[in-house]
Image: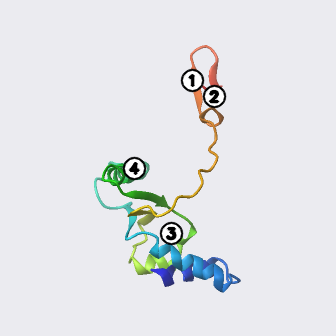
Amino acid sequence: LAEVFAQALLERDPGATPEQCGQAREKAFRAPVLMLVVVDGERGDPEIDLAERLLSAGCAVQNMLLMATAQGYGSALTSGKALKAASLRALFRLSACEQALCFISIGTVLSRKAARARPMAGTYVSTLDADRGVVPGF
């Protein structure tokens, strides 16, 4: 997996440095449990739209993250351009109808990154008001 991460980087950036390739490889070793979340757009009930399947997968991921936290583990969802790389798709033998969504990492927290600034909900949420129509923010 580490080599596929490095190869995926080189597929999208042939000029990547050896240090950048090393950083890409390191991602495969960040947690003792690393799961790939995949949605198959063709299996299952054809009446269920792909958007609903994707949303359901997101809910399942959130539940797994909460479960890990409840059990005392650290957990994280990671995504990125490597998910679309031909080398990663080949490693996991993904068919054309399967979409790799993210990785879930679970393990013991050894260090934490500083919290990043998050936008206020009001900057991307709107409300439908009967008199005024769509109103930005809360």
Sooner in the amino-acid sequence: mark 2 or mark 3? 3
Numbered disc in front, either 3 or 1: 3
Sooner in the amino-acid sequence: mark 4 or mark 1? 4
User: Residue 100: x and y, percent?
Assistant: 44, 65
User: Residue 106: x and y, percent?
Assistant: 38, 62
Sooner in the amino-acid sequence: mark 4 or mark 2? 4
Numbered disc in front, either 4 or 2: 4
Q: Give the labeled residue for mark 3.
A: 83
Residue found farthest to the front: 110
Q: Give the labeled residue for mark 2.
A: 137
Q: Amino acid at mark 2?
A: Gly
Q: Amino acid at mark 3?
A: Leu
User: Residue 71: x and y, percent?
Assistant: 30, 53
Residue at image position (38%, 48%) is 59
Could you tell me how far apart the alpha carbons at marks 2 and 1 are, in whole angstroms? 10 Å
Viewer-side residue, 12 vs 74: 74
